Amino acid sequence: MEKPLSKAHRAFRDFEHAGWKSVARGYHDHFASLTTQAVKPLLDAAGVSSSMRLLDVCTGPGYAAAAAAERGAAAVGMDFSPTMVAQASRNYSRVRFLVGDAEAMPFASERFDAVITNFGLLHLARPEQFLREAHRVLRPGGLVAFTVWAPPEEAMGFGMVLHAIQAHGNTKVPLPDGPAFFRFSDPMECRRTLRRTGFTDSEAARAPQLWRLKDADDLFQAMLTGTVRTGGLLRAQTPEALAVIRDAIRRSVEVNRREDFYELPMPAVLASGVKP
């Protein structure tokens, strides 16, 4: 039986829910070219093909659900943010999108052949509860697959921003506590958690990605206006500290100039498991 949300879990969930109402457009503008790089490997890991029934959880602007539909799958995209669902529906009018809770899915058991989430696990108060729900709505033999960011020393965009905040700002700002952002950056932790939530044949590995930026200030703007957790950390800084942090991030990005653009390694970790 599902345990009720604790006060801390509810505070984090409310923080994320409110955040995605305000950063939906910024996420699409800044992160689409990056996070869509993981869609094909994610669908391949979930074995997505024609006539499959697929659920894309934390669908955001709908990229993965739409790509699954292009493969011929009967795809449904679900997100807890009405703003994101409205945006996804505008982007891909032929795909079904709905508002729903990743930790209490509004579907009957054994409904889907595959459940995926592309960088959605990071924004859930209880990631294990999502995986238990994915297990419930999957048919026997169905697959779950998810992506998360690699650790900040590899996903350089996060590393640059967090280092700048640590050096020039305040990391002890009053934001709700949530699960460790880079917990699942460890492939071993992905496999352990998949096994604990009932999945077998679990796999997890790095997936290379490159983030191409047009301007040295784009990384700061992307994190400030297109993310909830990292953006919340930035928005909680004093104006003076934020200006220094911005300059430090810009200098870090400048080192990665490639002719008339900037390129940052931003690998993902891709994990999957099978419902026995």
Image: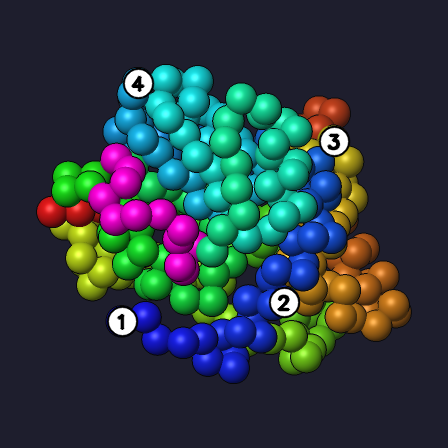
Residue 266, how many percent across, how many down? 52, 42
Q: Nearer the viewer, mark 3 or mark 2?
A: 2
Q: Which residue is mark 4?
A: 50
Q: Which residue is mark 2?
A: 15
Q: Are marks 3 and 4 in contact (CB under 8 Å)?
A: no
Alpha carbon distance from label 1 to label 3 = 49 Å
Q: Amino acid at mark 1?
A: Met
Question: Is residue 124 shown left or right of residue 141?
Answer: right
Alpha carbon distance from label 4 to label 2 = 37 Å
What kind of element bears circle 2? helix
Q: Specify which label sits upstream in the sequence, 2 or 1.
A: 1
For the point 25% across and 35% down, which residue is it? 113
Q: Which mark is residue 1?
A: 1
What is the magenta range? 102-113
Q: Specify which label sits upstream in the sequence, 3 or 2.
A: 2
Q: Nearer the viewer, mark 2 or mark 1?
A: 1
Q: Specify which label sits upstream in the sequence, 3 or 4.
A: 4
For the point 48% across and 38% down, which residue is it? 77
Residue 230, how many percent across, how many down? 64, 60
Residue 87, how many percent across, how many down? 66, 36
Vertical relation: 75 (above or below) 103: above
Q: Which residue is mark 3?
A: 214
Residues packed near mark 1 inside 10 Å, few (<14), some (14 to 19) or many (20 plus): few
Q: Specify which label sits upstream in the sequence, 4 or 1.
A: 1
Alpha carbon distance from label 2 to label 1 = 25 Å
What kind of element bears circle 4? loop
Q: Amino acid at mark 4?
A: Ser
Alpha carbon distance from label 3 to label 2 = 31 Å
Q: Amino acid at mark 2?
A: Phe
